[in-house]
Image (cartoon, rainbow, N blue to C red):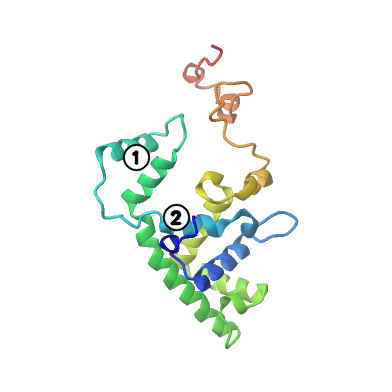
Amino acid sequence: MSGSDSDVVLSPHERATIEAAAARIVPSDKDPGASEAGVIDYIEGLLATDEDVDTDISPREKKEYANFLLGSMGGRTEEQQATLFKLNGLGSRHRQAYRDGVAELDRLASEVDPGKNFCGLDEAGQDRVLTALDERKDPFFALLLTHTMEGFYGHPRHGGNRDQVGWQMLEYPGPSFPHGNETPYGWYDENEPEDFPHAKKDRSS
């Protein structure tokens, strides 16, 4: 996010509420949580991606998207990521879901402690609200959970997983790309099932 007015898709209250909710999904304890990973920046970046979702998709962008779906060895480029969001209309579909979700978080919070919104609750109260949404299989909670996991464990280039804190928790060193042809090889090269030895590429040259 650049911080300009055109980039802002969440009000300060919406941003604070979503950040607080994500922080209860991946709380900070002996390890960093969603707050330290910058999950809120990932989510707001996702919601801001396709302001022009109704614009035409060029043939080149469609090719980029096809390359993304095919899982090219080069990894997902920023251009492919942007085109993916544009084609699927993710931001425009999810912005309203988040606004409605924040309103519901605040409504449930007032039932837990009258006069308070979600941010005003203590951690136990916030957990009660989120548990209620989870138990009733609320679509917004499922969306928030998905995006929190993406922002915590995804590639830092997409706005979350700041300082690779999510990867560090898993002791994951990061993708082998762009050094996949160098020793040591990536995880899949080292652990590929022996049932398919003919499919393993010769990377010795």
Q: How many marks?
A: 2
Q: Residue at x 41, y 67 (%)?
A: 97
Q: For numbered disc 1, what is the local secondary structure?
A: helix
Image vertical order of residue 143 relative to residue 178, above or below: below
Vertical placement of residue 20 versus 73, above or below: below
Cα gap from disc 2 to disc 1, whole angstroms = 17 Å
Q: Amino acid at mark 2?
A: Leu
Picture residue at 34% right of the left edge, 39% below the top: 65
Q: Amino acid at mark 1?
A: Tyr
Nearer-the-camera pick, 84 or 126: 84
Any mark on residue 46, and which?
A: 2
Question: Residue 190 occupies which quadrant of the picture?
Answer: top right
Viewed as shown, does residue 123 lie left or right of 14? right
Which residue is at the far right?
Answer: 30
Vertical side of 37 occupied by 198: above or below: above
Position of the C terminus by quadrant: top right
- Is 105 left or right of 168, judged from the image as shown? left
Q: Which residue is pictured at 51% across the width and 18% down the height?
A: 197
Badge 1 density bin: few <14, some 14–19, many ≥20, Cα 10 Å = many
The spot of residue 13 in percent (x, y) is 52, 73
Outermost residue toward the bottom in this view: 114
